[in-house]
Amino acid sequence: MPRYGRFQREGRKGFAKDATANEAVGRAILDAAFKIHSSLGPGLLEGAYELCLAYEIGRLGLSAQRQVLVPIQYDALRIDNGYRIDLIVDDAVIVGLKAIETISTAHRAQLLSYLRLGGFRLGYLMNFNVARMRDGIFRLVNDL
Protein backbone atom coordinates (compact mmCIF):
# COMPACT_ATOMS: atom_id res chain seq x y z
CA MET A 1 0.00 0.00 0.00
CA PRO A 2 1.45 3.42 -0.93
CA ARG A 3 2.24 5.88 1.83
CA TYR A 4 1.43 9.53 1.30
CA GLY A 5 1.96 11.05 4.74
CA ARG A 6 1.23 14.62 5.78
CA PHE A 7 2.47 17.62 3.85
CA GLN A 8 3.63 21.02 5.08
CA ARG A 9 1.24 23.85 4.26
CA GLU A 10 2.05 27.51 3.91
CA GLY A 11 -0.04 30.54 2.99
CA ARG A 12 -3.53 30.12 1.52
CA LYS A 13 -5.63 27.04 2.05
CA GLY A 14 -5.17 24.49 -0.72
CA PHE A 15 -1.57 25.35 -1.49
CA ALA A 16 1.31 23.21 -0.35
CA LYS A 17 4.78 24.54 0.35
CA ASP A 18 6.06 21.85 -2.01
CA ALA A 19 4.25 22.15 -5.36
CA THR A 20 4.17 18.38 -5.78
CA ALA A 21 2.30 17.82 -2.52
CA ASN A 22 -1.14 18.55 -4.04
CA GLU A 23 -0.35 16.11 -6.85
CA ALA A 24 0.65 13.44 -4.32
CA VAL A 25 -2.64 13.97 -2.49
CA GLY A 26 -4.43 13.73 -5.84
CA ARG A 27 -2.72 10.43 -6.63
CA ALA A 28 -3.77 9.08 -3.23
CA ILE A 29 -7.39 10.07 -3.92
CA LEU A 30 -7.30 8.37 -7.33
CA ASP A 31 -5.75 5.20 -5.89
CA ALA A 32 -8.46 5.05 -3.23
CA ALA A 33 -11.25 5.65 -5.77
CA PHE A 34 -9.98 2.89 -8.07
CA LYS A 35 -9.74 0.49 -5.14
CA ILE A 36 -13.30 1.25 -3.99
CA HIS A 37 -14.76 1.00 -7.49
CA SER A 38 -12.95 -2.30 -8.11
CA SER A 39 -14.41 -3.71 -4.93
CA LEU A 40 -17.95 -2.29 -4.95
CA GLY A 41 -18.57 -1.43 -8.61
CA PRO A 42 -21.24 1.01 -9.81
CA GLY A 43 -24.83 1.18 -8.60
CA LEU A 44 -24.59 2.37 -4.99
CA LEU A 45 -25.72 5.71 -3.62
CA GLU A 46 -23.28 8.62 -3.54
CA GLY A 47 -23.16 8.60 0.27
CA ALA A 48 -21.79 5.06 0.37
CA TYR A 49 -18.92 5.97 -1.94
CA GLU A 50 -18.26 9.12 0.09
CA LEU A 51 -17.93 7.16 3.33
CA CYS A 52 -15.69 4.55 1.71
CA LEU A 53 -13.46 7.18 0.09
CA ALA A 54 -13.07 9.07 3.39
CA TYR A 55 -12.21 5.77 5.09
CA GLU A 56 -9.60 4.80 2.47
CA ILE A 57 -8.04 8.27 2.52
CA GLY A 58 -7.74 8.04 6.31
CA ARG A 59 -6.05 4.66 5.96
CA LEU A 60 -3.45 6.33 3.72
CA GLY A 61 -2.58 8.79 6.49
CA LEU A 62 -4.42 11.80 5.04
CA SER A 63 -7.27 13.78 6.55
CA ALA A 64 -10.69 13.87 4.92
CA GLN A 65 -13.40 16.34 5.90
CA ARG A 66 -16.91 15.42 4.71
CA GLN A 67 -19.78 17.72 3.73
CA VAL A 68 -17.92 20.99 4.37
CA LEU A 69 -20.06 24.13 4.21
CA VAL A 70 -19.05 26.61 1.50
CA PRO A 71 -20.28 30.11 2.32
CA ILE A 72 -20.68 32.72 -0.41
CA GLN A 73 -19.39 36.21 0.31
CA TYR A 74 -20.90 38.98 -1.80
CA ASP A 75 -19.85 42.46 -0.71
CA ALA A 76 -20.93 42.66 2.96
CA LEU A 77 -23.42 39.80 2.57
CA ARG A 78 -22.54 36.27 3.67
CA ILE A 79 -24.74 33.43 2.38
CA ASP A 80 -24.64 30.09 4.20
CA ASN A 81 -27.21 28.32 2.03
CA GLY A 82 -26.29 24.69 2.10
CA TYR A 83 -23.55 24.63 -0.50
CA ARG A 84 -21.37 21.75 0.60
CA ILE A 85 -18.15 20.21 -0.61
CA ASP A 86 -18.34 16.41 -0.50
CA LEU A 87 -14.71 15.94 0.61
CA ILE A 88 -11.70 18.12 1.36
CA VAL A 89 -8.60 15.95 1.49
CA ASP A 90 -5.62 17.01 3.59
CA ASP A 91 -6.86 20.64 3.53
CA ALA A 92 -5.65 20.82 -0.08
CA VAL A 93 -7.81 18.99 -2.64
CA ILE A 94 -11.57 19.09 -3.19
CA VAL A 95 -13.46 15.99 -4.28
CA GLY A 96 -16.99 16.12 -5.66
CA LEU A 97 -18.68 12.71 -5.73
CA LYS A 98 -21.51 11.58 -7.98
CA ALA A 99 -23.30 8.32 -8.69
CA ILE A 100 -25.30 9.40 -11.74
CA GLU A 101 -25.72 8.54 -15.42
CA THR A 102 -23.46 11.29 -16.77
CA ILE A 103 -21.50 14.29 -15.51
CA SER A 104 -22.81 17.54 -16.96
CA THR A 105 -21.10 20.86 -17.53
CA ALA A 106 -23.14 22.18 -14.58
CA HIS A 107 -21.42 19.66 -12.27
CA ARG A 108 -18.00 20.79 -13.50
CA ALA A 109 -18.97 24.44 -13.08
CA GLN A 110 -20.11 23.72 -9.52
CA LEU A 111 -16.75 22.15 -8.64
CA LEU A 112 -14.88 25.07 -10.18
CA SER A 113 -17.03 27.46 -8.12
CA TYR A 114 -16.15 25.53 -4.97
CA LEU A 115 -12.45 25.74 -5.86
CA ARG A 116 -12.73 29.51 -6.30
CA LEU A 117 -14.89 30.15 -3.23
CA GLY A 118 -12.60 28.08 -0.99
CA GLY A 119 -9.31 29.28 -2.47
CA PHE A 120 -8.32 25.77 -3.54
CA ARG A 121 -6.22 24.92 -6.57
CA LEU A 122 -7.00 21.26 -7.33
CA GLY A 123 -10.25 19.35 -7.45
CA TYR A 124 -11.65 16.07 -8.73
CA LEU A 125 -15.16 15.27 -9.84
CA MET A 126 -15.78 11.52 -9.59
CA ASN A 127 -18.74 9.62 -10.93
CA PHE A 128 -18.85 6.09 -9.51
CA ASN A 129 -21.79 5.05 -11.72
CA VAL A 130 -19.55 3.99 -14.62
CA ALA A 131 -18.27 0.62 -15.82
CA ARG A 132 -14.62 1.81 -15.72
CA MET A 133 -13.67 4.27 -13.00
CA ARG A 134 -11.21 6.09 -15.24
CA ASP A 135 -14.19 7.18 -17.38
CA GLY A 136 -15.81 8.85 -14.37
CA ILE A 137 -12.90 11.03 -13.21
CA PHE A 138 -12.53 14.70 -14.10
CA ARG A 139 -9.63 16.79 -12.82
CA LEU A 140 -10.05 20.56 -12.48
CA VAL A 141 -7.41 23.16 -11.67
CA ASN A 142 -8.22 26.64 -10.44
CA ASP A 143 -5.56 29.00 -11.78
CA LEU A 144 -6.59 31.62 -9.23
Image: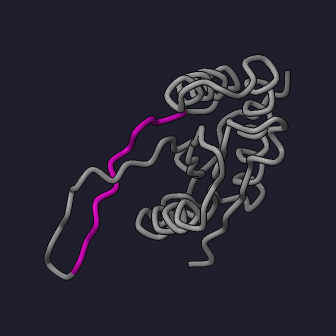
Left or right: 26 as drawn, with respect to 52 = right
Nearer-the-camera pick, 35 or 10 = 35
- Residue 66 in the image: state x and y as whole percent: 44, 35
Q: Report the label total.
A: 0
70 magenta-colored = yes
Magenta span includes 54:
no
Q: Is residue 2 above or below residue 126?
A: above
Placement of 21 over or under 48, stated as above or below: below
In the picture, measured across the screen, residue 88 lies left or right of residue 29, that is left
- Which image quarter holds the C terminus? bottom right
Q: What's the residue at 73%, 33% (across, down)?
A: 33
- Name the image quarter holding residue 121: bottom right
Q: Quadrant of the N terminus?
A: top right
Residue at point 18% right, 67% down? 78
Whether residue 11 appears in this view of the structure is: no
Residue farthest toward the front in the current orientation of the protein = 101
Query: On screen, 55 above or below 101?
Result: above
Visual colour scheme: one colour
Relative depth, front residue between 2 and 18: 2
Q: Residue at x 68, y 36 (%)?
A: 128
Magenta stretch prevailing secondary structure: strand
Q: Quadrant of residue 130?
A: top right
Q: Is residue 59 visible?
A: yes
Q: Which residues are magenta?
A: 64-74
Q: Residue furthest left?
A: 76
Identity of the residue furthest to the bottom in this view: 75
The one nearer the camera, 73 or 47, is 47
Rendering coords of residue 41 (x, y %): 75, 24
Residue 36: x and y in percent read 73, 24
